[in-house]
Amino acid sequence: FSSPAFANDMIYLSGTIDGIGHVYALSQSGKLIWKKPYGPEFTESYPGSRTTPVIAGDLLYIYSGIGLLTCMSANSGDMKWSKDLFKELGGQQIQWGVTETVVIDGDRLYITPGGKQHNVVALNRMNGQLIWSSKAKGEKSAYCTPLLVRLPNRTLLVTHTESHVIGLDAADGKLLWSQHQPNRWSVHSNTPLYYNGAIFYFSGYGQGGGLLKLSDDGATAKQQWFSKTMDNRIGGAVVVD
């Protein structure tokens, strides 16, 4: 259920063999360069790897469907460090396995364990150490990859959790605003979009989507419109022009 990633003149993929998640590195012509396991994967319903490898320089990051975050060498697949976000940070499993591709910005890694205390966190991507932790709304994660929004005076981290869209200050994790966005299955797998000072958010199962107008500093968000016809369970959207 993941996508390929292209970096360092290689193609990186994730997959599962007998319940164990693996990362594969291929040449541009399709030759296998290396294949390394990263640990047990989600095997209950819809078994298989869920997240796309993220490459930053010579390091690669992969998040399993059961909450294990692993950093590997992008050149060899050798493990650098791993962190069990369920055991170490109180993260919670969700019905079809956690499904989130990590976001990297400089030396920081952003991810949503979905715990009551450590709901969204920033980690040092070099060693996995905690930089900040946000309680946010205290909800489970919602299959969503976050979005970084760079404003003149602040960088926002925007994502869906179980029943809300949330906006955090990426510097310290402070919850700045939230928008109620529930649906029947608590599935919000589409990353919000940013354009022209506003956030477009959307999910499915009869819920729809809307537009949030941000204040200049990103500290507040006010709903401009909402439409139930913007119903999209999975698949996402992109901004064109």
Image (cartoon, rainbow, N blue to C red):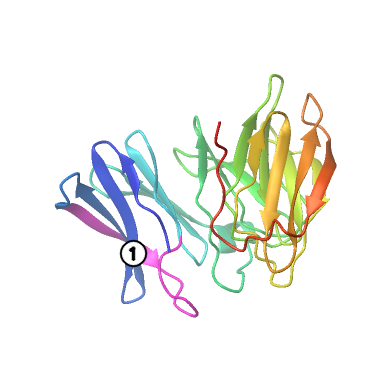
Q: Amino acid at mark 1?
A: Gly
The location of residue 147, given as percent across then percent down, is 60, 41
How many numbered discs sit on the rendered protein? 1
Quick check: 171 left or right of 130? right
Q: Is residue 135 visible?
A: no
The location of residue 66, given as percent across then percent down, is 51, 67
Q: Residue at x 42, y 53 (%)?
A: 52
Residue wearing tag 1: 15
Instruction: Look at the image and say whether residue 43 sits in the magenta stretch.
Output: yes
Q: Is residue 231 above or below residue 157?
A: below
Quick check: 33 left or right of 119? left
Q: Quadrant of the C terminus?
A: top right
The location of residue 175, given as percent across then percent down, is 78, 42
The location of residue 144, given as percent across then percent down, is 60, 55
Query: Local crowd at mark 1 within 10 Å, few (<14), some, or many (≥20)?
Result: some
Residue 57 lies in quadrant: top left
Q: Residue at x 19, y 44 (%)?
A: 28
Q: Residue furthest bottom?
A: 44
Q: Is residue 52 visible?
A: yes
- Nearer to us in this view, 27 or 135: 27
Q: Residue at x 78, y 25 (%)?
A: 217
Q: Is residue 224 above or below residue 82?
A: above
Which residues, given as a range, are shown in magenta?
Answer: 33-50
Instruction: Look at the image and say whether residue 54 sits in the magenta stretch.
Output: no
Q: Residue at x 51, y 47 (%)?
A: 102
